[in-house]
Image: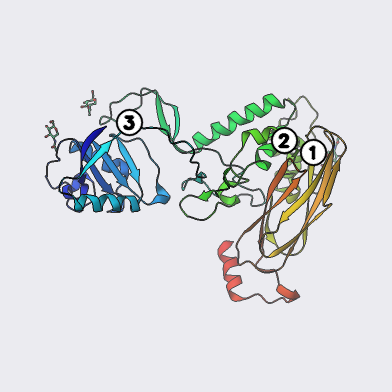
Amino acid sequence: MRMMRLVDGRRFFSSGSCSLEQWNGRKMPPAAVVLCFSTVLQVPSTVAAISVWRLNASALIFAEPSTRLMPQDDLLPTVHVDLIQATQILNYIKSSNNPTIDVFPSKWRLGRSPAPSVAYFSSRGPSSVFPSILKPDIAAPGVNILAAWSPKAPPTLIPRLDNRSVAWNFQSGTSMSCPHVAGVVALLKSAHPHWSPAAIRSALMTTAVMADTSSDTILAGGTLKAADPFDIGAGHMDPLKAMDPGLIYDMDTQDYILFLCSIGYTEAQIRKIVLPNISPININTSCSEVYSDPDLNYPAIVISDLHTALTVQRTVTNVGSGAAIYFARVVSPQGVHVSISPHCLVFFGEGEKISYEVTVIPLKRSGGRYDFGEIAWSDGYHRVRIPLVVRVSTHFAIGGGSESDEAGITNYIQLQ
Ligand SMILES: *[C@@H]1O[C@H](CO)[C@@H](O)[C@H](O)[C@H]1NC(C)=O
Ligand SMILES: *[C@@H]1O[C@H](CO)[C@@H](O)[C@H](O)[C@H]1NC(C)=O
Ligand SMILES: *[C@@H]1O[C@H](CO)[C@@H](O)[C@H](O)[C@H]1NC(C)=O
């Protein structure tokens, strides 16, 4: 343990914000740990770290709203705390003649597992290009990932000031979550070499979770609301469950071609994507068949403009070992009635495919809002869950009438 001096950063900067331009000329005591607030003039932690480092401080305690808490690489040892903790620290500094802080070596705390939350900077759905495909598909770890780092680049990426060279560094972003998913895809492919890319995605999506093992709900970072499919897709991936998903929503090249046709690609454009001439199998790139986009056998159903009753089809393939009976459980999104047919799927063997239909009937206008539900098939052991996302059209007329209220029209115009 080492005892260090704890100081209030506001004493050293004229406006109270820890930024070097505001330094009031006061000398920092030796071996000082400085408390700085992000909320005073919106100073980022990197600026606060550089500023107190320049004043020869030893470490920084940086306070920021809990929704933004994200430790990052700094020039000097930094602890990030939320505003409630920071206020307690500040009260202690004010009430003591000689405030100090004890620094201990770090240690593991086992047995606590709060659910992860979606990073505030994570990109959100719906897909603006194609609303009837759920985006994102899936969530995976992407904050503070210890990853390889070029020894030529300083860990803070600040040239000249930071001359350290490291082989490992903490990083955050899609660049970190994507390799987690790619690694799990590689595992799934080695366990199931014959699965198509669509089957692998289906296994990942239908087994993903919206809560952790203690049923603590995953929150959407940046807010304190529970994550919905536009934050997290089908959920947080669960590699072990994905190994044995029970059923998969499979697709082949032809399905993708028909989908591209339905969203307006020409045959010439599609031929450039699928390269039929060098493909080992004979691929038909003709766009003559009529196809409606919600029928792509995607492991999610998104209906972005429901005017009237709509029926969507999905086909599941049994990848469990042998015969199985699955029953459906539906959670209807608010404002719609959902029915599923058949309600029970009986498989006699592995590889067998069965189609089912989902009919969604609007009951009330939703003012442009999307509502969330799910369809889960279970055989008592596997749970094969897909998100069901519906936005009732503001042109849908309640009770068969044709008038639309002004607020509804305004919303509709804003969203177009
Ligand atoms: C920091 O420490 C160096 C070396 O002891 C000293 O020259 C410099 O004046 C100090 N800077 C401040 C702002 O106190
Ligand atoms: C980092 O290295 C450069 C070039 O060698 C040097 O000019 C600079 O003073 C160094 N900075 C620190 C903080 O040591
Ligand atoms: C190619 O697919 C279309 C439907 O998209 C079908 O009408 C046509 O007969 C198929 N051609 C061949 C050679 O199979």
Question: How packed is label 3: few (under 14 Cα within 10 Å), some, or many (20 or more)?
Answer: few
Measured from the top left, where is residue 351 in percent x and y?
82, 34
| Residue to which mark 1 is pinned | 317
Measured from the top left, where is residue 118 in percent x and y?
51, 46
**In the figure, 91 relative to 112: above or below?**
below
User: At numbered mark 2, what does the secondary structure look like: helix, strand or loop?
Assistant: helix
Q: Looking at the picture, which amino acid does disc 2 mark?
A: Ala
Q: Between residues 49 and 280, which one lies in front from this camera angle?
A: 49
Q: Between residues 80 and 41, which one lies in front from this camera angle?
A: 80
Q: Nearer the viewer, mark 2 or mark 3?
A: 3
Residue in the image at 34% along x and 32% along y:
157
Question: How packed is label 1: few (under 14 Cα within 10 Å), some, or many (20 or more)?
Answer: some
Question: How packed is label 2: few (under 14 Cα within 10 Å), some, or many (20 or more)?
Answer: many
Q: Which mark is residue 105?
A: 3
Residue in the image at 21% along x and 48% along y:
8
**Can residue 309 be seen?**
yes
| Residue to which mark 2 is pinned | 199
Q: Between residues 313 and 255, which one lies in front from this camera angle?
A: 313
Taking the image as shown, residue 46 lies to the left or right of residue 238, namely left
Measured from the top left, where is residue 80 in percent x and y?
34, 43
User: At numbered mark 3, what does the secondary structure look like: helix, strand or loop?
Assistant: loop
